[in-house]
Amino acid sequence: MYAKGSAEGDARITFLDMTKTNGWKVRALVFDLDGTLIDSKLDLANSVERDFARNEAEGAADGSGGELCGLGGASADSKGPRRKSERRRVEAGLAFFLVHYEEHKLDETRLYPGVAETLAELKSLPMSVLTNKPVKISMKILEGLGVSQYFAAFTAETVLKRRSRIRPVRNRS
C-alpha cells in the first residue's frame, strides 16, 4: 500500500498485492506524516504567514521569515544562514513559528481520505511515524485526529539530518 498525492493535494491510496512479496515478510510500517497521513499545508502556511507579518512589523520587509520553510525547523544549523546575527534572527523566527503552529496545528489539518480506515486494517503490524516535525506536535496532531493509538513510535528531530539518506531495508533471509 502507498499513498500518492496529486497536484491538487488529494491523496489516493493504492493497495498493492502483498501476497506476492518474493518471500519477504512485512514486519513493520513507517509512515511520513505530512503529505502521506495528513494534509497540514494550510496550518503550516498560516504559521509561516504570521512569521512573515511579524518580520515586516519588525522592519525585515524582505520576507526573511521563510528561510526555513521546507527544510524542517531543526535544520537551521546545517542549511540556514551562517552569520551569527542572521542565525539569531532565524532562531527567533523559528521560535515564533513553532509557538504559533503549536497553537494552530489542528485548525485545518486533516487526515487524507481513507487513512483512518487503512490504519485500522493494518493495526496488527507495528507502525511508526518518521517526520521532521517536532515529536510533541506530531503526537498531538495524531491524537487530535484520533489515530495516535496505531503508532508505537515517533521519530523526528534526532534523524532529521540523516533522513534524506534513509533507504528501504530488504530482508533477504
Image: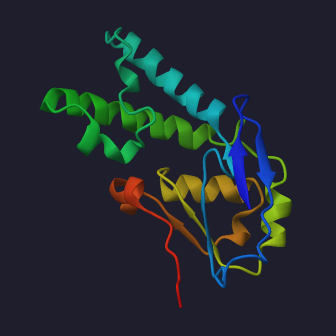
Give the number of callouts: 0
- Please state if 112 lies on the left or on the right of 32 as rendered: right
Front-most of residues 48 and 80:
80
For the view shown, which residue lies furthest in the bottom direction? Answer: 173
Residue 46 position by quadrant: top right
Q: Position of residue 153 (x, y in %)?
A: 56, 72
Front-most of residues 29 and 150:
29
Residue 67 position by quadrant: top left
On screen, residue 26 above or below 150: below
Please tell me which residue is depicted at 52% across the width and 35% down the height of the picture: 100
Residue 20 position by quadrant: bottom right
Q: Position of residue 172 (x, y in %)?
A: 52, 85
Front-most of residues 154 and 136:
154
- Please state if 61 lies on the left or on the right of 40 as rendered: left
Q: Position of residue 130 (x, y in %)?
A: 52, 60
For the view shown, which residue lies furthest in the left direction? Answer: 83
Q: Position of residue 84 (x, y in %)?
A: 13, 32
- For the N terminus, which image quadrant? bottom right
Front-most of residues 118 and 172:
172
